[in-house]
Image: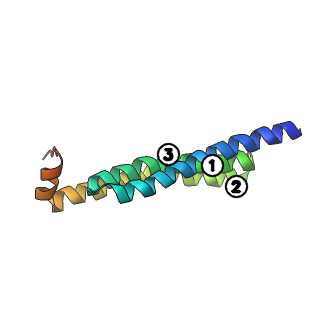
Amino acid sequence: MIVLLWIRFSIAALLMIGGLFLLFSVLVGLFRFNNVLNRIHVAAKCDTLGLLLTLSSLIVMYGWSYVSFKLLLILIFFWLSVPVSGHLIAYMEVMTNNKKVTEECKVITQC
């Protein structure tokens, strides 16, 4: 019984360390990249994966309970909303600063 608890704790710790590493890389990426579209890309991709790993580590620690069900609902909400909001912010940037964006990036717009 104690061995199973340590295995579950080890899996949760590895998931938490991986999630925190990805969330830290988002922070570094937001300060390193110059272009807004690059910043949004880093934030949208690594945020969703970092949140997946962090919340899944909490789910593993709690086991199957009401708390883990709520954490799973939060995870689903973030996985649906973060990419959509990143896309909308990128679309707004392309539409408002089209000249600056087309100088730095190749933008394909469809009407």
Q: Residue 50: x and y, percent?
A: 52, 49
- Give me the C-alpha separation between circle 1 and circle 2: 17 Å
Crowd band around label 3 with a 10 angstrom C-alpha radius: few (<14), some (14–19), many (20+): some
Q: Nearer the viewer, mark 1 or mark 3?
A: 1
Q: Residue 100: x and y, percent?
A: 14, 58
Under circle 1, the secondary element is helix
The amino acid marked with disc number 3 is Leu
On-image quarter of the N terminus: top right
- The outermost residue toward the right is 1
Q: Residue 75: x and y, percent?
A: 55, 51
Q: Upstream in the sequence, badge 1 or badge 3?
A: 1
Which residue is under mark 1?
16
On residue 67, the disc is 2
Q: Residue at x 73, y 41 (%)?
A: 10
Under circle 2, the secondary element is helix
The amino acid marked with disc number 2 is Val
Q: Residue at x 82, y 42 (%)?
A: 5
- Give me the C-alpha separation between circle 3 and circle 2: 21 Å
Q: Residue at x 54, y 49 (%)?
A: 21
Q: Quadrant of residue 98?
A: bottom left
On residue 49, the disc is 3
| Residue 78 visible in image | no
Q: Nearer the viewer, mark 3 or mark 2?
A: 3
Q: Upstream in the sequence, badge 3 or badge 2?
A: 3
